[in-house]
Amino acid sequence: CLEDKKINAENENRTIYIVDDHRQICEFLEQLFTSLDYSVKVYHTALDLLADFPLSNFGCILLDLRLPDIGGLQLQQEIVGLKCHLPIIFMTSHVDSQSAVKAMKAGAFDFVDKPVNLQEILEITQRALRLCARLNEEAKLHKFVLDKLAQLTAREGEICRLLATGSVSKQIAHTLGISQNTVEVHRNNIMKKLEANSIVDLTRLLLVTEDQLFDELKVN
């Protein structure tokens, strides 16, 4: 049916990366996700995965905690260092609390015990993909706001910062030593460039960039 075709098309755009030196596990997982029309890539060593970078920006990584060349925790660090934000699901038959804590602190999405339970791995993977989708949307919005901020002149950037802190035109005029009418003109230009309908909209957009990013942003 049409709905099934839509779901299949969405799954094809999501890549499941499987990193495990146990070939039987890899074959099982590959068949499972391929049957659901996911795009699947299998690697038997950490170096094989790293050699395939950059990865897709939509998917997740099923990672064996113990690999023959680089340990799973070290590989996790390498992945994060390469600015890859795909959710990582660790698979292991012998997890210790210390490793689990390190992995979770470093941003691991979850742990799955071996032998892998079909229903469990599907549910966790789907949750990881939903997280990935949300992160991608946030990244798009973040880029959109930064692109808009880059269009501001230096004076507009100053006024924009003050508007975001709650200052009104009269206060901004006094702070910058310019007329209130000039502030209003710049304010209208800022609102148009950032496609904001109100100061509330403007504040929400700036929050997306996080304060430090906006402070470091170089305007024209």
Image (spheres, rainbow, N blue to C red):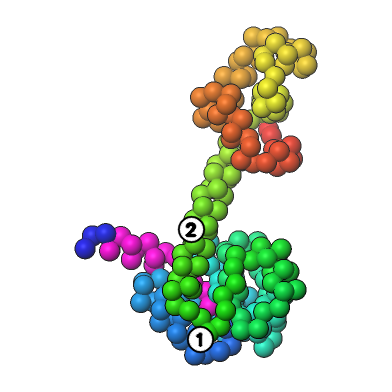
| Residue 113 seen in render | yes
Image disc number at residue 179: none
- Three-letter amino acid code of the residue under disc 1: Ile
- Give the residue at mark 1: 25
**How far from the left and from the top, in percent, is residue 5?**
28, 63
**Disc 2 versus disc 1: distance between alpha carbons?**
24 Å
Q: Quadrant of the N terminus?
A: bottom left
Magenta part of the protein: which range?
4-19
Q: Quadrant of the C terminus?
A: top right
**Quadrant in the rendering for residue 32:** bottom left
Is 14 displayed left or right of 57 in the figure? left
The answer to whether residue 36 is magenta is: no
Vertically, is 106 above or below 206? below
**Quadrant in the rendering for residue 92:** bottom right
Q: Identify the residue at horizontal 52%, vertical 90% (top origin).
A: 23
Q: Residues within 10 Å of mark 1 (few under 14, many from 20)?
A: some
- Three-letter amino acid code of the residue under disc 2: Arg
Vertically, is 131 above or below 196? below
Dot 2 falls on a residue whose secondary structure is helix
- Give the residue at mark 2: 130
